[in-house]
Image: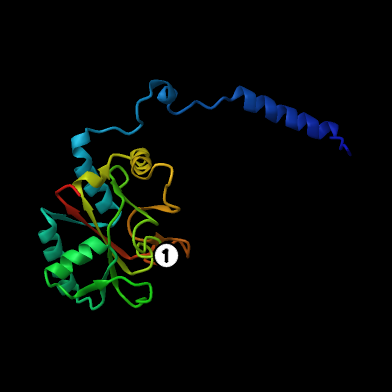
Amino acid sequence: MQTFKTSKGKENILSRIRKELNDASTSIPFPEAEKSGAPLYAWPIEDMEETFVSAFAKLGGKFVFCENELELMQNILLLKESRGWDDMLCADPRLLKLFQNNKINEIIAADARLESAEVCITGCELLVARTGSIMVSSRLNLGRMSSVYFPVHIVFAYANQIVADIDDAFVAMRKKYGTDLPSMLNLTTGPSRTADIEKTLVVGVHGPAEIFCFYINADL
């Protein structure tokens, strides 16, 4: 193996750098974090809904509270009328059946071929309170497409689908699916946005420009 000699001047410089690095030790921001076992972020468990709403709104999400599924359908129809949306898709079979059973035919089944649609309604796996994120997976119908493709994404969730933090979300997913986890887990945190071009914030480039969360105050 070929070896390379370092000049005396270069070696002197490197020696001084090593010495300075050894002498100037950087303090650990949270030295007791690993020892204590306590979570870095903590709040009363009863405040999870309020924490999610606050974080979700700060990120540009729009939150709608619903007492039950009937109010959910009414609020979605009101939103459709106020925005003047023509094509509104629903990727969740259970919610679509509720619309059909109530003779609401303005909302149709989501199909990957309906690429011109403006809005898609989906369920979700979980809501993450601290980050205001929505977790979706490939196990949901059109789970890979519906949450990133259409200009407006409407998500509905139930009271027992909210968890405190991302760690809790993965624990819940393992409990639900065991070792057969979905091949894709995605945390959606607010509408799509980027500032890559001239550091100007642009919304809706890589995904939905608007995200709504309709929260049903009942367990799934």
Q: Residue at x 40, y 61 (%)?
A: 144
Left/right of residue 21 with respect to residue 198 in the rendered view: right
Residue 18 seen in render: yes
Q: From this viewpoint, which residue is outermost toward the right?
A: 2
- Element at badge 1? loop
Q: Position of residue 174 (x, y in %)?
A: 38, 41
Quarter of the figure with residue 213? bottom left
Q: How many marks?
A: 1
- The image quarter containing residue 178 is top left
Residue 79 seen in this snapshot: no
Q: In this figure, which colouring scheme has been used for the structure? A: rainbow
Q: Nearer the viewer, residue 141 or 64?
A: 141
Residue at figure coordinates x 84%, y 35% from the top left: 6
Residue 95: x %, y % from top left: 21, 62
Residue count near mark 1 (Cα–Cα under 10 Å), binned few <14, some 14–19, many ≥20: some
Query: Which of the image's four quarters has the N terminus?
Result: top right
Query: Looking at the picture, how far across and down is residue 143, in whole percent?
Result: 37, 60
Residue 194: give x, y in percent of width and height: 42, 61
Q: Is residue 26 above or below residue 112?
A: above
Question: 142 or 11: which is nearer to us?
Answer: 142
Inspect the image, locate mark 1, and give the three-letter code of the amino acid beneath it.
Answer: His
What residue is shown with label 1?
A: 206
In the displayed structure image, the side of residue 219 where residue 117 appears, left or right: right
